[in-house]
Amino acid sequence: MRQFGLLGRGISYSLSPKMHAALYESMEIKATYELVDGELAEVLSKLRTLDGFNITIPYKQEIMPYLVSIDPAAQRIGAVNTVVADEAGWHGYNTDYHGFRETVKGLIQRDVTSAIILGTGGAAKAVYYALKDMGASKIYVISRHLGATFEGIPCLSYEMLEAGDICSDLLVNCTPVGTNGKKDHQMSPVSEKVVSKQGAVIDLIYNPERTPLLKIAEGMNIPVSNGLKMLVVQAIYAEKFWFPEREVDVQKLYEIIVRAL
């Protein structure tokens, strides 16, 4: 029986084991999927027993030096969320890109020409390149660190965002602010003033289903989506890398997983 898992820290809330169990049942695959939670150096030995694994906060970039190859798309994004293991070693891919594009297409029926990204981590990079490939010509990236840059462009601070008057087609939260179990789980990363100027809001958090940020946007009748669709679709794409010999119907498997959750 093949073994897979999710690498991260503080991820007991994750839906990934349940999702992949539903995938394996639907695809009639004999495999297991478990959480590998802890400091990267301490769990490497466990990871080496797996046939492959996903990666979440905070290791999407930290895992890269351990890989023998990185897919061009993941190299461009600068982050890996899926690893395939074989005799040669670990091979890295990024499936967040595909998951985010599907989320945007399901939420917004018009072109996205401008966007605000909160955060600068691995997920933010997948979001950034997906938005660029979808035609967004003006993307503002917000960082907690003054003077920070992101993919060669200067970041704005949260203070600058709050003091300014930036309107966009889409605001995307790529930070963990608002996640259940975190100390700031009852907080929104930005104020009502900022939210009111956006055409739509996506929060990549999926636990809780409705974060403080999304509740603010919903109260203003702004279209919203949490991170569940991105999570589900990226999981399906991971299975495509782990089982390349299998035919995968993304829409059918998406519907199966959502019902299981």
Image (cartoon, helix red, strand yellow):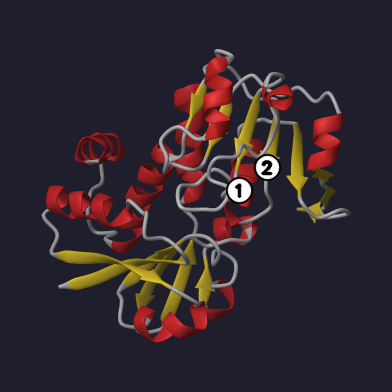
For the point 62% across and 48% down, the residue is 124
x, y percent for residue 144: 76, 51
Q: Residues within 10 Å of mark 1 (few under 14, many from 20)?
A: many
**Residue 36, numbered circle:** none
Dot 1 and dot 2 residues touching (CB under 8 Å) = yes
Residue name at image x 41 percent, y 83 percent: 88
Residue 240, image quadrant: bottom left
Residue 81: x and y in percent read 48, 60
Q: Residue at x 78, y 41 (%)?
A: 158
Q: Amino acid at mark 1?
A: Thr
User: What is the secondary structure assignment of the residue under circle 2?
Assistant: strand
- State which quadrant residue 30 falls in: bottom left
Quarter of the rendering occupied by the C terminus: top left
What number is the disc on residue 118? 2
SS state under label 1:
loop
Indicate whether 30 appears above or below 232: below
The residue labelled by disc 1 is 175
Determine whether, in the image, residue 234 is placed left or right of residue 69. left
Q: Is residue 65 above or below residue 52?
A: below
Q: Specify the amino acid type for callout 2.
A: Leu
Say few, some or many: other residues with alpha carbon within 10 Å of mark 2 (under 14 / 14 to 19 / 20 or more). many
Q: Looking at the image, is mark 1 or mark 2 earlier in the sequence?
A: 2
Q: Nearer the viewer, residue 9 or 256?
A: 9
Q: Is residue 226 above or below residue 196?
A: below
Q: Residue at x 83, y 23 (%)?
A: 165
Which part of the image, by quadrant, shows the N terminus?
Answer: bottom left
Vertical comparison of 261 with 84: above or below: above
Residue nearest the viewer, comparing 78 with 69: 78
